[in-house]
Image (cartoon, rainbow, N blue to C red):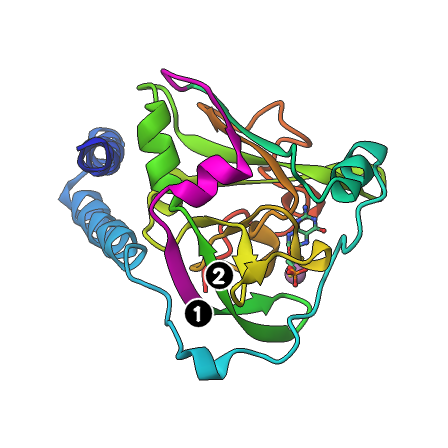
Amino acid sequence: MRRRNFLVAAGAAVLAGCNKVAESAPGARLLSAAERWHKGAHRLLTNREALAPEYPRSAVSPFFRGNGTTDPQEPAYQRHAAEGFANWRLEVGGLVETPMSLSLDNLRRLPQRTQVTRHDCVEGWSAIGEWTGPQLSLLLEAAGLREEARFIVFRCADTLNGDVYYESVDLLDAFHPQTIVAHSLNGAPLPIRNGAPLRMRIERQLGYKHAKYLTAIEAVASLEGIGGGEGGYWEDRGYQWYAGI
Ligand SMILES: Nc1nc2c(c(=O)[nH]1)N[C@H]1C(S)=C(S)[C@@H](COP(=O)(O)O)O[C@H]1N2
Ligand SMILES: [Mo]
């Protein structure tokens, strides 16, 4: 229901955009250009609902390499690692009706999705892995997004070159069925290298969107004022915010 409302709202925003173009246009020529633009935008929205390819278990890469941070040195993280992540919490907050603080056990008891997908890093490598965890949509539906929420921000425990890693997606990717909060890779708890104890899988986008060492999920109305304001650690350094593949 929420998701449908969101899609209706996204459609309305697209139409409102067209109306603005039409109002400011000197004639019908621009209006038809706006209509073509609308159709293009609509196609984009529907394409973005498609599933990323999934593979048989036999396609899993023998070694899933790590990239970026592979062993966070932050003392708080190291303490959690020493405890086998027994006391790790995932906070779900921001523009939600009911903020939540979830243990790994809470997350493992929810309905799970397992998917074998290919991870593509902009640095020019790919790997196939089997990921398991609850869908992000489940957590967002449980917390209840407030009307103003437009983006979901992922907070991480690690810093890279002195800045905290973070990422964000819009609500289409947040509610995409393959967007999961993964706690397992190839049937075992995530190795530290790959984001233990929790990492995002955003299967329609490039590797840097898949935030590792996840501590919090935050619903926001705008990305301004978060990190460098571009929606992610790498985005603040010039990468595309929407990294569709
Ligand atoms: N917290 C955090 N998440 C991160 C990164 C990072 O450095 N820190 N690197 C990103 C990049 S560029 C890629 S390609 C993937 C790598 O995931 P992997 O280490 O499991 O291969 O994680 C992404 N998520
Ligand atoms: Mo990457």
Relative image position of residue 154 (x, y in whole percent): 56, 37
Q: Nearer the viewer, residue 42 or 122?
A: 122
Determine whether, in the image, residue 165 is placed left or right of residue 160: left
Which residue, as the protein is rendered here, is positioned at the far bottom?
58
Question: Image quadrant of ligand 2?
Answer: bottom right
Identity of the residue drawn at 51% across and 64% down? 187
Q: Amino acid at mark 2?
A: Trp
Asked whether the beta carbons under mark 2 and mark 1 sit within 8 Å of each other, the answer is yes
Q: Is mark 1 within 8 Å of ligand 1?
A: no
x 33%, y 49%: residue: 176
Image coordinates for residue 166, horizontal then vertical, percent: 64, 39
Q: Which residue is mark 2?
A: 131
Quadrant housing the N terminus: top left
Look at the image and give the residue range highlighted in magenta.
Answer: 96-116
Cα separation, mark 2 vs mark 1, equals: 6 Å
| Image height of 136 relative to 96, above or below | below
Name the residue carrying label 1.
Answer: 116
Eyeballing the image, is 67 above or below 100? below
- Residue at image point 37% right, 24% down: 143
Q: Is residue 173 magenta?
A: no
Q: Residue shown at 64%/74% (left/top)? A: 125
Q: What amino acid type should be assigned to the residue bearing mark 1? A: Val
Label 2 packing within 10 angstroms: few (<14), some (14-19), many (20+):
many
